[in-house]
Image (cartoon, rainbow, N blue to C red):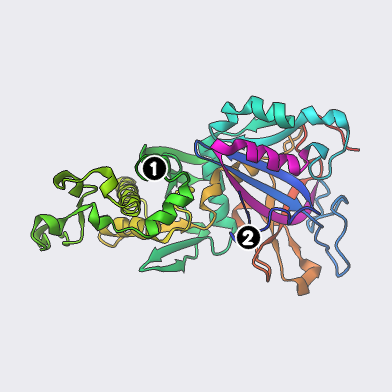
């Protein structure tokens, strides 16, 4: 299990023990479970006095008494789906049954707790969450959640997007007025290519079954590795050229310059195994892992660019836990996009790549009894300007700021009657 702050740095799992989990959402995929929760601590004050209690109502600057500001921090947690019991234990330790946010502590409220959930596992494990935790999974459509989460990150979080070229990250400033349309490549167990035209406007235009699940599945069969991270770590030590057939292997060490193929280009993944009189055990597991990662990453990069070309899209954003900030994976995808586009397109990665669905489900929270808006981030100004620390912003122009220790203290604008419980009265 990993727990991260919004800046992507590791946070200890007990770092919010003194805070309230105000809101929580979960994305249960075929390989991984992703959780996003917002832990409250205090509200931002509109003067130089100490912040008010998190249970008090606060008037926002525009005088709207129907909404208040929650101050706190986003946390990101992941588990392997095959170890869902660990996820259950984690949620149980957070004592959601004792009320989330400013809710009451009635014992009869347990069966009425709702959390937003997306992914196929939200259907598959509905009964398990009900039986073990008394939680009702309020399901949010998966593709919609992924797109909503991506839009949120692209608009709200500074230094979220970067390219990876020549071993170097370069952060990209996103112009919100020129964001759409774009191609979102979500790499989970499988891969979805989504053309995004705006908030709530998207279409899944392509995909491939060769994704993160393929990497781990074949990797377990071929190398005996038991986890994704173990397989990635093994690939660090490998040399794919021992197994992959290169152009130079066919052309006597020469380039195939007429069609622009260097001698080091891969002509056939795992191709050398055809002509060599070797068994599986004769190959090093690290070389197999490297070749497998290269094959899948190259394939994703090529398909991504061809779909961007098909629809005339200038921006390609990649998300999903397959990438995991892994240098070799990002380099391979970047080189593939650069090669097939002849340098005209670049692969762009997201720091919170694996939590798009969970974030999108989180943004789906709203007070069902009214026509209230979902929770929104509002801008947090530097502490010295506390007299104007809350600035009410619409969703498509929000931003967050990192504090000095790397994590981000956020402000959520929610309706005063906002709740996660279904039909549970306040104390």
In the rendered image, the residue lying farthest to the bottom is 384
285 or 281: nearer the viewer: 281
Q: Is residue 360 above or below residue 138?
A: below
- Which residue lies at the image location 81% right of the left edge and 39% below the top edge? 99
Which of these two is toward me, 231 or 354?
231
Left or right side of 241 for 63:
right
Where does the image place residue 322, in percent across and percent down from the top left?
Answer: 45, 48
- Residue underneath mark 1: 211
- Is residue 79 inside the magenta stretch? yes
Q: CA distance from mark 2 to mark 1?
A: 32 Å
Q: Is residue 158 above or below residue 228?
A: below
Task: Indicate the quadrant containing the C terminus: top left, top right, bottom left or bottom right.
Answer: top right
The magenta segment is 67-96
Look at the image and tell me whether residue 419 can be seen: no
SS assignment at label 1 = loop
Say whether residue 333 is left or right of residue 11. left
Residue annotated with mark 2 = 399
Residue found at x 52% / y 49%: 354
Label located before the other in sequence (2 or 1):
1
């Amino acid at each position: 299990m990993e727990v991260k702050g919004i800046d992507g740095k590791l946070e200890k799992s007990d770092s919010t023990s003194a805070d309230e989990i105000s809101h929580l959402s979960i994305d249960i995929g075929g390989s991984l479970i992703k959780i996003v929760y917002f832990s409250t601590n205090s509200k931002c004050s509109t003067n130089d006095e100490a912040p008010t209690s998190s249970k008090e109502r606060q008037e926002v600057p525009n005088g709207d008494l129907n909404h208040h500001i929650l101050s706190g921090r986003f946390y990101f947690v992941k588990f392997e789906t095959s170890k869902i019991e660990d996820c259950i234990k984690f949620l149980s330790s957070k004592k959601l049954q004792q009320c989330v946010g400013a809710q009451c502590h009635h014992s009869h409220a347990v069966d009425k707790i709702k959390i937003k959930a997306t992914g196929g596992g939200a259907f598959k494990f509905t009964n398990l969450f009900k039986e073990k935790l008394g939680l009702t999974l309020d399901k949010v459509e998966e593709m919609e959640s992924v797109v909503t989460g991506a839009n949120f990150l692209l608009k709200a979080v500074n230094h979220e997007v970067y390219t990876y070229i020549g071993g170097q990250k370069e952060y990209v400033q996103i112009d919100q007025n020129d964001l759409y349309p774009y191609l979102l490549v979500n790499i989970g167990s499988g891969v979805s290519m989504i053309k995004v035209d705006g908030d709530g406007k998207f279409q899944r235009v392509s995909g491939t079954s060769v994704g993160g699940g393929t990497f781990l599945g074949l990797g377990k069969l071929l190398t005996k590795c038991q986890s994704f991270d173990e397989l990635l770590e093994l690939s660090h030590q490998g040399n794919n050229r021992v197994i992959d057939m290169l152009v130079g292997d066919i052309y006597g060490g020469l380039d195939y310059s007429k069609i622009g193929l260097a001698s080091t280009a891969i002509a056939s993944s795992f191709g050398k195994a055809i002509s060599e009189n070797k068994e599986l055990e004769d190959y090093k597991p690290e070389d197999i892992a490297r070749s497998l990662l290269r094959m899948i990453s190259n394939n994703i990069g090529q398909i991504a660019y061809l779909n961007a070309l098909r629809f005339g899209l200038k921006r390609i954003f990649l998300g999903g836990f397959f990438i995991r900030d892994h240098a070799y994976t990002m380099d391979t995808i970047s080189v593939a996009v650069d090669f097939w586009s002849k340098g005209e397109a670049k692969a762009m990665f997201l720091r919170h790549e694996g939590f798009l669905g969970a974030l999108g489900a989180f943004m789906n929270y709203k007070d069902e009894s009214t026509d209230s808006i979902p929770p929104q981030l509002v801008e947090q100004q530097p502490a010295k300007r506390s007299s104007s620390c809350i600035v009410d912003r619409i969703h498509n122009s929000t931003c967050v700021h990192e504090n000095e220790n790397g994590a981000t203290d956020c402000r959520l604008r929610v309706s005063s009657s906002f709740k996660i419980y279904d039909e549970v009265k306040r104390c």
